[in-house]
Amino acid sequence: MQAVALEPQAWGSGFRAQRPAASAPGTVAVLDAQCRWQRLPLPGSVLASSSRYSELPGTGGKGTLKVTAAVTVHTSVGTADEQLATTLEEALRCRDQQVRTDERISGLASVAVPYGQGGNTYADDSVLEIGSYLTGNSAQTYRWHVARLGSVTVAVSVMGAKGYKDDELTRYSSHALTTMLSRIESELGGKN
């Protein structure tokens, strides 16, 4: 798992670890009934889960760009599929979500992109969620992309910042997701 989740330098030049730099071992991110993200102990359907948090400090009039790379190993393809279905539904259940004390995401919408549709030739299934990232008085673009290969899911979030265009955020997200999917294939000994 540590070989799959992107470390800061894999995002690109200038990225560094956030504080905290990674999720607590033996936990998984869960959106609770009050639409708040929390880390809870791994359920029986998850073998392991890890998230790494990185940032690109603001320079030249740009704000600090925050990103997350996560990988979760499920006990079966079915439970991995359930994670994607839940991700798709969460944007409907909680259009506004509390990420951290001072960070929220809002106005969420999600779309499923199964293999062979919408240009998805890279994963068995995929979900894209978009909305606004809110911190202080600032609202920026938010993107969360989750993809599944077999019983492994990878997720990438990009929380936009002042001075970043949507296409730049899309490039960071796409690069991170394809890199992690490639790492999974390598760890599993080739494409399934």
Image: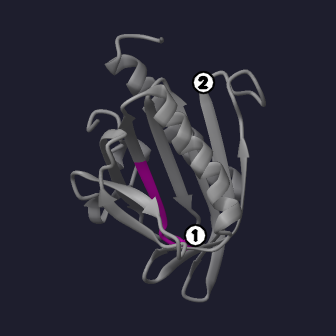
Say which quarter of the image contains residue 73: top left
Q: Amino acid at mark 2?
A: Tyr
Q: Amino acid at mark 1?
A: Ala
Q: Which mark is residue 11?
A: none
Specify few, some or many for label 1: CA neighbours under 10 Å numbering under 14, 14-19, or 20 or more.
Answer: many
**Residue that numbered label 1 is attached to:** 161
Q: Is residue 163 above or below residue 102?
A: above
- Residue at (65%, 78%) from the top-left corner? 139
Q: Is residue 187 left or right of residue 64?
A: left
* Residue at the limit of the structure toward the front, as seen here: 44
Q: Nearer the viewer, residue 180 or 87?
A: 87
Range of residues picked out in magenta: 60-69
SS of the residue under disc 1:
loop
Question: Would you say residue 26 sits in the magenta stretch?
Answer: no
Visible residue check, residue 178: no
**Residue that numbered label 2 is attached to:** 122
SS of the residue under disc 2:
loop
Mark 2–mark 1 Cα distance, whole angstroms, equals 28 Å
